[in-house]
Amino acid sequence: MPIKTILVIDDSPTERHILSQMLLGGGYQVSTADSGEEGIERARQIKPDLILMDVVMPGTNGFQATRSLAKDETTKDIPVIICTTKNQETDRIWGLRQGAQAYVTKPVDGPALLAMIAALG
């Protein structure tokens, strides 16, 4: 199924803006959430084709939110790309174990991320 709608979950307004502009430039429709809790709710409501998930957020962090989405019947088939400043190999492995399809670190390489999204679609 081609990816058209992407949900960006990040507590940083700057990161949400940068990622949204990059994705809009790539021809995607973008929705945003500023917390893990809001992201889970929005994912259930709008059922995006893909989720970009930050890790370091207050409340429900990105690892917890990814695990919740992967276990939820409504959202389990939505691919998640973790997009974070956490660049340790153990973080990457843990993120993928929570159900993420891919793991990228910030600052994001725009063309590489767009290519990754296209490959998942």
Image (cartoon, grey):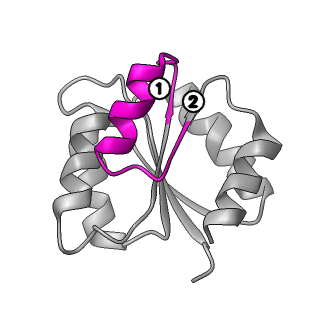
**Residue extent of the magenta highlight:** 83-103
Camera-nearest residue between 66 and 32? 66
Which quadrant of the view contains residue 60? Answer: top left
The foreground one among 108 and 104 is 104
Q: Where residue 67 sits in the image (x, y, percent)?
A: 23, 48
Nearer the observer, 109 or 47: 109
Q: In the figure, is residue 98 to the left or right of 120?
A: left
Q: Secondary structure at mark 2?
A: helix
- 94 sits left or right of 121 in the view: left
Q: Residue at x 48, y 21 (%)?
A: 89
Instruction: Determine crowd level at label 1: few under 14, some 14-19, many 20+ residues with C-alpha closer than 10 A.
Output: some
Q: Which residue is mark 2?
A: 15
Q: Along the horizontal axis of the image, is 65 left or right of 10?
A: left
| Residue closest to the eye, 88 or 79 | 88
Q: Which residue is mark 1?
A: 12
Above or below 95: residue 26: below
User: Residue 70 placed where, x, y %?
Assistant: 26, 59
Amino acid found under the numbered disc labelled 2: Glu
In the image, is residue 30 above or below residue 91? below
2 and 1 marks in contact (CB < 8 Å): yes
Residue 77 coordinates in the image, percent (x, y): 35, 72
Q: How many marks?
A: 2
- Residue at image position (17%, 61%) is 71
